[in-house]
Structures are given as C-alpha cells and as structure tokens.
Image (tube, rainbow, N blue to C red):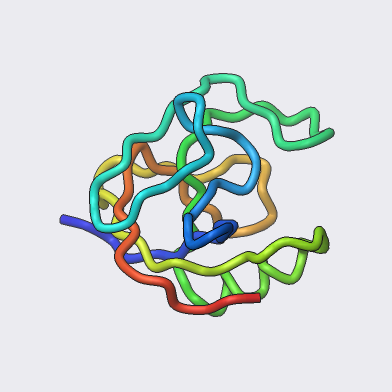
Amino acid sequence: MYLTGFKIVEKKNGQYLTLFHGNFGSRKLTANEWITAQIRDKAKDGTSKSVYRSGFHIIPTLDETKAYLTRFKAPRELVIVKVLYPADTFWLKEHSPSNIHLSESMMIIEEVDHA
C-alpha cells in the first residue's frame, strides 16, 4: 500500500533535483520510477544541531507543502511534485516543527505547482 504526498524540488533545465543533499553522489531525481534514498543515520540540516535518520522528505498535504515552500528565499526554480511512497516504512522527522515524513523510497508521479 502506498501513500500520496508532496515534495519540494529544484527544477533546472527540465531536470528535477534534490534541494540540498545529494543522493548517491547526484542531486538528479527521475520521474515515473522508484527511487531509493541514500540513508544517513546521523544527518543534519544546515546549522541545526539536531541529528536524525535521513530519507526523502515528503509532506503529506499540498497545503502544508505550499506553506513550507514559503521558507525558501534563494533565487532558483522550485516546484512541488506529487509522489507515492510506501505506507509501511516511512518515519516522522524528529525535532521538526513541520509535518515531515521521511521515506526510503518514492516515485515522482507529476508536477503540481511551482513557486
């Protein structure tokens, strides 16, 4: 069983890219195929001192994703994509004030909005 959620990605020259951390040495994300995340057991975001188990960051609703998108100020093209991810293997991002699901895998199924 799969859940539907949303992910913020960068779009450059028609290619979807992760926002920050690479995945197995690349920021490229492909659509319409299952992608496996490079899991890091002690990941950090920016200057945060909080450590967490990494995975693909997925937000459950489009409204929450649009609100989260307003945090990004750097001049780059950001888009929201709809994704599928396994319902039985995701975990919550601890210490996050936002509703972030982390997943070992996902499939980008469509682009739904842009900044």
Instruction: Give the residue furthest to the front.
Output: 13
Q: Is residue 60 or residue 72 the one in the foreground?
A: 72
Indicate whether 105 appears above or below 59.
above
The residue at the point 62 percent across, 48 percent down is: 19
Question: Which residue is more in the foreground, 84 or 99?
Answer: 84
Question: Where, quadrant-wise, is the C terminus in this rendering?
Answer: bottom right
Query: Is 52 left or right of 61, judged from the image as shown?
Result: right
Residue 22 or 100: which is nearer the viewer?
A: 22
As drawn, the residue found furthest toward the top would be: 41
From the viewer's perspective, tell me whether residue 75 is left or right of residue 79: right
In the rendering, at what x and y percent does residue 24 appear?
45, 25
Count how many numbered circles sit on residues in the image.
Answer: 0
Q: Which residue is drawn at 60% across and 20% down?
A: 42
Position of 86 with respect to 80 (left or right) is left
Residue 85 placed where, x, y %?
A: 30, 52
* Residue at 69 percent of width and 55 percent of height: 97
- Point out the image quarter for the N terminus: bottom left
Q: Which residue is found at the position 25% from the left and 57% from the top?
A: 32
Q: In which quarter of the image is residue 50?
A: top right
Horizontal and vertical percent for residue 38? Answer: 43, 27
Q: Where is residue 3 in the image (x, y as percent from the top left)?
A: 28, 61
Q: Quadrant of residue 75?
A: bottom right
